[in-house]
């Protein structure tokens, strides 16, 4: 008899229903009509709320007249809880006065089924509610994914916008600064030449000259920052770039007590601007070295190819980055270094360069244990090298 009411089309076994009624005979009857669904039961309101929260049924069949807490109250409380608000509630009731139906709908129910319950009607109504819920869930999931994608794109856009604005600003300011600074440096050098070497005045002038040199260096960094490179993209071997940069930085790293372990993978070339790639490596290695001061440590560099991407991993066992600061390290001017030791422009520069190379850079870190920066760049495809050679 029950079988006649079954519909073959829906995947009922995937859906779950919570039946709430203070009479176990009513529950048994409904359960017979719905035996091919996954079923949960509750004989009173509090228990129903707990089951709904824990098992998240797809729909709730709720008796209106119950001692302690009636169906309306259960429904209101389900709708107040963010974990159960989206579960559709259908009242099963012997009462059929319009004002009572209105109260049920106000409490958040989506439908009423009258007692005595007709099995075929019950199944048909539930099936359409379940289908609706499935569509709604799918849409919500889709919407959530789109929102996340949009959020990530927006963040990236915001970042590049910030970079280009700051780039424009800094290049105009540094341009204003560099000529007068060079003039001052020349004049100071002139004075210095007239002084007795080793005298107090000459030492003071020496300091002034080296401060001018330091400021010019800083201005050079600022000018490079954010400027769109006109340099040419060419097939580039990252292993060569890394070896070159290590030759340059090895003395400094040695002084910092850093041992370098470089494991060269068998990697394809990437389409890159060589000097920009060098800048990225230099920044990453310098930061790693700085993070290991004063104890020193190990700088591990690994290159590797995977799924059409060249991966570069730069790992140190230095101070690490606090969890809540991980989102800030690529932002311009974020630095934890003393004034004069860091500009806070290194990583945002790296970020800009890697994005322009259609790659990705990200960081994992644990405070007190060290950091791992990973750069991903697309390998050159046959098409790229064909275009390149034309
Ligand atoms: N390998 C690292 N380990 C720990 N902290 C790091 C590391 N690399 C970068 N950081 C943090 O990110 C900040 C920004 O780095 P960066 O943009 O290169 O600027 P700067 O080196 O001039 O401070 C650093 O001051 C430091 O706090
Ligand atoms: Mg740096």
Image (cartoon, rainbow, N blue to C red):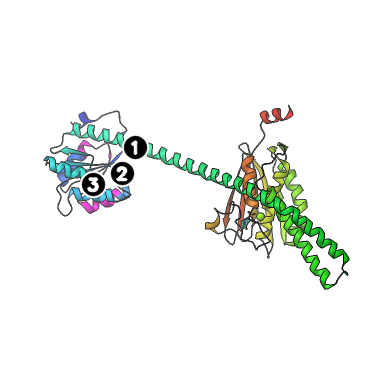
* Ligand 2 quarter of the rendering: bottom right
Question: Is residue 296 placed above or below 300 in the rendered structure?
Answer: below
Q: CA–CA distance between discs 3 and 1?
A: 25 Å
The circle on residue 86 is 2
Instruction: Indicate yes or no: mark 2 CB to ligand 1 under 8 Å.
Output: no
Q: Position of residue 110 (x, y in %)?
A: 23, 40
Q: Residue furthest bottom?
A: 200
Q: What residue is drawn where x is 69% and y is 52%?
A: 174
Is residue 41 part of the magenta span, yes or no? yes
Q: Point out residue 96 in the picture as x, y percentages from the top left corner.
A: 12, 39
Of the two numbered discs 3 and 2 in the rendering, the one whose residue sits closer to the viewer: 2
Q: Quick one: label 3, few (<14), some, or many (20+) residues within 10 Å? A: some
| Along the line of sight, the residue nearer the viewer: 340 or 184 | 184
- Please state the horizontal and vertical placement of residue 106, each as a whole percent of the image: 21, 44
Q: Residues in magenta?
A: 31-52
Q: CA distance from mark 1 to mark 2?
A: 10 Å
| Mark 1 surroundings: few (<14), some (14-19) or many (≥20) residues within 10 A | few
In terms of sequence position, does the residue under pointer 3 or pointer 2 come before the other? 3
The x, y position of residue 235, in whole percent, is 72, 36
Whether 326 is drawn above or below 10: the answer is below
Q: Is residue 38 left or right of residue 92?
A: right
Q: Quadrant of the C terminus?
A: top right
Kindly tell me whether mark 1's CB lies below 8 Å from ligand 1: no
Q: Across the whole image, how many numbered discs are drawn on residues? A: 3
Decide: marks 1, 2 in contact (CB < 8 A)?
yes
Q: Secondary structure at mark 3?
A: strand
Whole-angstrom CA distance, mark 3 to mark 2, is 19 Å
Q: Secondary structure at mark 1?
A: helix
Question: Which residue does the numbered mark 1 point to in the structure image?
Answer: 136
Is residue 253 in sight in this rendering? no
Of the numbered discs in the image, which one, if any, rests on residue 41?
3
């Amino acid at each position: 008899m029950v079988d006649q009411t079954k519909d073959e089309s829906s995947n009922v076994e995937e859906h779950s229903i919570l039946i709430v009624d203070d009479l176990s005979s009513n529950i048994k009857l409904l359960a017979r009509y719905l035996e091919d669904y996954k079923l949960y039961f509750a004989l009173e309101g509090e228990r129903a709320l707990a089951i709904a929260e824990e098992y998240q049924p797809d729909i709730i069949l709720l008796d209106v007249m119950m001692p302690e807490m009636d169906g309306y109250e259960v429904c209101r409380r389900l709708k107040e809880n963010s974990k159960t608000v989206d579960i559709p509630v259908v009242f099963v009731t012997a009462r059929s006065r319009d004002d009572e139906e209105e109260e049920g709908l106000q409490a958040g129910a989506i439908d009423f089924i009258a007692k005595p319950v007709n099995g075929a009607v019950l199944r048909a109504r539930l099936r359409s509610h379940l289908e609706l819920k499935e569509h709604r869930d799918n849409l919500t999931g889709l919407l959530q994914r789109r929102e996340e994608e949009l959020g990530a794109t927006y963040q990236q856009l915001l970042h590049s916008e910030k970079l280009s604005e700051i780039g424009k600003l800094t290049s105009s300011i540094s341009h204003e600064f560099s000529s007068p600074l060079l003039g001052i440096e020349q004049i100071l050098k002139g004075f210095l030449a007239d002084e007795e070497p080793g005298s107090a005045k000459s030492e003071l002038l020496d300091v002034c000259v080296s401060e001018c040199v330091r400021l010019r260096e800083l201005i050079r960094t600022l000018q490079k920052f954010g400027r769109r490179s006109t340099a040419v993209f060419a097939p580039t071997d990252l292993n060569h770039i890394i070896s070159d940069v290590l030759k340059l930085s090895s003395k400094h790293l040695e002084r910092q007590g850093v041992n370098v372990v470089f494991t060269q993978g068998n990697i394809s070339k990437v389409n890159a601007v060589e000097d920009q790639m060098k800048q990225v490596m230099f920044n990453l290695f310098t930061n790693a070295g700085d993070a290991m001061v004063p104890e020193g440590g190990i700088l591990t560099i690994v290159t590797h190819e995977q799924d059409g991407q060249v991966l570069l991993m730069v790992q140190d066992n230095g101070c690490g980055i606090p969890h809540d600061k991980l989102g800030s390290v690529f932002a311009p001017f974020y630095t934890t270094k003393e004034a004069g030791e860091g500009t806070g422009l290194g990583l945002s520069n790296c970020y800009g360069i890697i994005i322009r190379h259609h790659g990705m850079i990200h960081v994992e870190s644990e405070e007190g244990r060290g950091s791992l920066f990973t750069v991903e760049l697309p390998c050159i495809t046959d098409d790229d090298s064909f275009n390149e050679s034309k």
